[in-house]
Amino acid sequence: MRFLHTMVRVTDLDASLHFYCDLLGLTEVRRMENEPGRFTLVFLAAPADVERSAAERSPEVELTFNWDPEPYDGGRNFGHLAYKVADIHAACQRLMDGGVIINRPPRDGRMAFVRSPDGISIELLQEGPALTPVEPWLSMPNTGSW
């Protein structure tokens, strides 16, 4: 058995791709349009996995966009997606500069939480040892829930 992907339903595919790819740094590795089913699937991989074969990749994120709008109620029972990043301060700054709220800033230089456009909680973890805590993160309060 091998864990393949986590599926997240999205309401605005363009906004979600901007968040996951342009701001978070994932890469689209394949896309499937299903006209009879009226949905689009977009699979995203971490940059370190893009050059690997599908069999060698870490689990991917599958964005499911249903063409006919329907409401999705987020639940805390889902938990979160987690990604290791090379520089948590730079990752959070890039997200914040892109208009993303940093719900739990990396005050400890090690961990932060943000939310996708559809309210999916994303945990960012510093690769290796924690970075030295610095402003603006050190004094930034938590915002909302994560």
Image: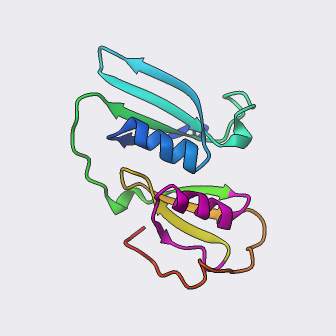
User: In the image, 128: left or right of 101?
Assistant: right
The quarter of the rendered structure image containing the N terminus is top right
Residue at 47 percent across and 59 percent down: it is: 100
Q: Quadrant of residue 136?
A: bottom right
Residue 67 within the segment the image draws in magenta: no
Q: Quadrant of residue 71?
A: top left
User: In the image, 126: left or right of 41?
Assistant: right
Residue at 65 percent across and 43 percent down: it is: 46
Q: Residue furthest top?
A: 36
Q: Is residue 7 visible?
A: no
Query: Which x, y percent locates residue 19?
Result: 49, 47
Q: Is residue 92 visible?
A: yes
Residue 86 within the segment the image draws in magenta: yes
The quarter of the rendered structure image containing the C terminus is bottom left
Using the image as rendered, state which of residue 74 and residue 142 is in the foreground: 142
The magenta segment is: 85-108
